[in-house]
Amino acid sequence: MLMRADPFRDLDRLTQQVFGTPARPALMPMDAWREGDEFFAELDLPGIDPESLDLDIERNVVTVRASRPQLDPNRSMIAAERTRGVFSRQLFLGENLDTDAIRAEYRDGVLRLAIPVAEKAKPRKIEIARHHDKQAINA
């Protein structure tokens, strides 16, 4: 099999791996939605060792870090398209979410975050004081 070195093709492939494409994001593609009083985010992390996952929060920024080990250098690879090494993604949360009550679960290659709406941000009724006393108007 004859293969030619094409630096432009190699650069294009590297750019797609690092930055992704609109059809295929590079690192940690995510879905996010709201159900009732909770927001959910699911990040795809197939083949990640759960021990390598790290989740930090500072103020309203959640940082997800994960790592996939490097390939065995003694292997003669035919294709190596999965991202290797340490990578991360940050999620910027609104002030109306309760960041102290975030729950996280990793199952079947998907990291799921559940973030409740803060009590102070939930709609509520305000009691209106009513005074039925009529005051006499003195002229």
Image: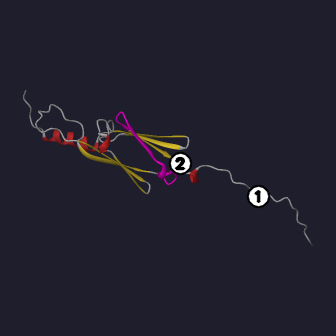
Count residues near mark 1 (Cα–Cα under 10 Å), then give few for <14, some for 14-19, many for 20+: few
Report x, y in % for residue 120.
Answer: 58, 54
Span shown in magenta: 94-110
Secondary structure found at label 2:
loop
Residue 31 or 75: which is nearer the viewer?
Answer: 75
Secondary structure found at label 1:
loop
Residue position for label 2: 117
Q: How is the image coloured?
A: secondary structure
Rendered residue at 19%/41% (across/down): 70
Mark number displayed over residue 29: none
Rendered residue at 32%/38% (across/down): 45
Residue position for label 1: 129
Report x, y in % for residue 3.
Answer: 9, 32
In this picture, is 90 found above or below 10? below
In this picture, is 127 found above or below 50? below
Image quadrant containing the N terminus: top left
| Quarter-of-image position of residue 13 | top left
As drawn, which residue projects farthest toward the right? Answer: 139
Report x, y in % for residue 127.
Answer: 72, 54
| 127 horizontally vs 5: left or right | right
Amino acid bearing label 2: Val
Amino acid bearing label 1: Ala
| 116 horizontally vs 69: left or right | right
- The number of callouts visible is 2
Residue 58 or 123: which is nearer the viewer?
Answer: 58
Count residues near mark 2 (Cα–Cα under 10 Å), then give few for <14, some for 14-19, many for 20+: many
In this picture, is 43 found above or below 135? above
| Quarter-of-image position of residue 52 | top left
As drawn, which residue projects farthest toward the left? Answer: 2
Q: Is residue 132 magenta?
A: no
